[in-house]
Amino acid sequence: MQVAWGNGQRPGRYGEHEGAFRFTCGGNGKLAYDDPVVFPGQPGRSHLHLAWGNEDFSATTTPQSLAASAANNCNATPFALNRSLYWMPALVDESGQVVRPDLISVYYKRAMASSPFCNPGAREFIGICTGLPNQIRFIFGWDADRPMSKTQGASWYCTGGDGRHHDNLDAVFASGCKPGDTLVANTQGQNCWDGENLDSADHRSHMAYANYRRGDGLARCPSSHPFHIPQQENKAMFTVTADMIGPDGRSRVKLASDHMMRGAKPGQTLHADYMEAWVAQAKALWLTHCIDKGLNCSGGELGNGTQLVGAAVPAYGMKIPKARVKAPPPPAQHSGH
């Protein structure tokens, strides 16, 4: 940790009832045809992924191996306090090159401890407010097991578009997104947990989104998932270039997972995976000072006048110097799932 912003500055409030902790990760993470959640111990079984956070990204990655690895591009220091791992399908162009994001902004947000949303006796109660479970892992966004179902927790938008979120890249570019704008792949994890399982057979069932099914306009965690946890959100930000948009206005880039959905439009299979491995003391700091107190902690601020080292700006700056790299060749046993 270091003194926040060099002078011990403490963040202000985030919202009336919510606290937020966020930081910036580099877009220069590892590329691999691996997925340690879906295909543990099976190298090369997955579509191509881009990882950020911990550099230990392979089919054999576990929460324990992450805890033993300090090298990462979210908290760039020899003793990283955020050792978690995040990944999404790689964005590729028509020549097979990977389009790297300039950066990824990672958020954790939840109702503050004193809010009515955390009070079981209040009408607004969402669920039992708690922290992020140790070693939890899950997937959110498009679901390969239910490919035609409506996607929750994943969308695209553009700084120069119509201001709306879209489920595919053709729609984003049709909305007015143009070269020089910032294209954002937005994935938002579940905010309710069953309180028992750190994983499940489909890597989703132990998690749920708060819903509005009672008809009173208030979101609540389902009774099967009564714990309200900090919701993880990733914003992978890409600089739009002219060759990403075809003469017909459609996208010339797609996700490496799009082939898994019949008739998918470019980018329609957006999803993300997460494996938790925070150093416990650091996680307790941002939960207690940022989330529970409703503060707006940015750049890795921990809410107490300290800050994660290397969590405000990627080591290379705000624009990645090499936006395209040749995709690694798929292994012979590659299944594409």
Image (cartoon, helix red, strand yellow):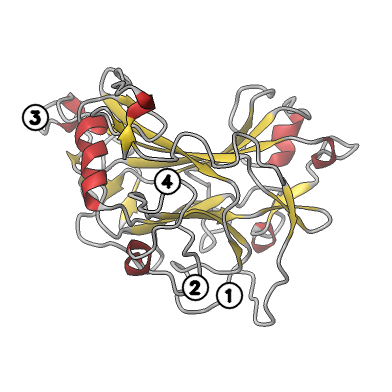
238 vs 331: above or below: above
Whether label 3 touches label 4, CB < 8 Å: no
- From the image, tell me which residue sits under label 2: 59
The answer to whether 151 appears left or right of 184 in the picture is left
CA gap between label 3 and label 4 equals 39 Å
Q: Amino acid at mark 2?
A: Ala
- From the image, tell me which residue sits under label 4: 75
**If the image is split into quadrants, where does the C terminus sit?**
bottom right
Considering every residue shown, the one lying at the far bottom of the view is 333
Report x, y in % for residue 1. Answer: 31, 40
Going from N to C along the chain, the mark reached first, 1 or 2, is 1
Q: Which sits in the foreground, 294 or 325?
A: 325
Q: Amino acid at mark 3?
A: Gly
Q: Amino acid at mark 4?
A: Asn
- From the image, tell me which residue sits under label 3: 121
Going from N to C along the chain, the mark reached first, 4 or 2, is 2
Element marked by disc 4: loop
292 vs 187: above or below: above
Badge 1 crowding class, 10 Å Cα cut-off, few under 14, some 14 to 19, many 20 or more, is: many
CA gap between label 2 and label 3 equals 45 Å
- From the image, tell me which residue sits under label 1: 45
Going from N to C along the chain, the mark reached first, 1 or 4, is 1
Whether label 3 touches label 1, CB < 8 Å: no
Nearer to us: label 1 or label 4: 4
CA gap between label 1 and label 4 equals 29 Å
Whether residue 73 is visible to the viewer of this picture, yes or no, is yes
Report x, y in % for residue 246. Answer: 86, 40
Going from N to C along the chain, the mark reached first, 2 or 3, is 2
Going from N to C along the chain, the mark reached first, 3 or 1, is 1
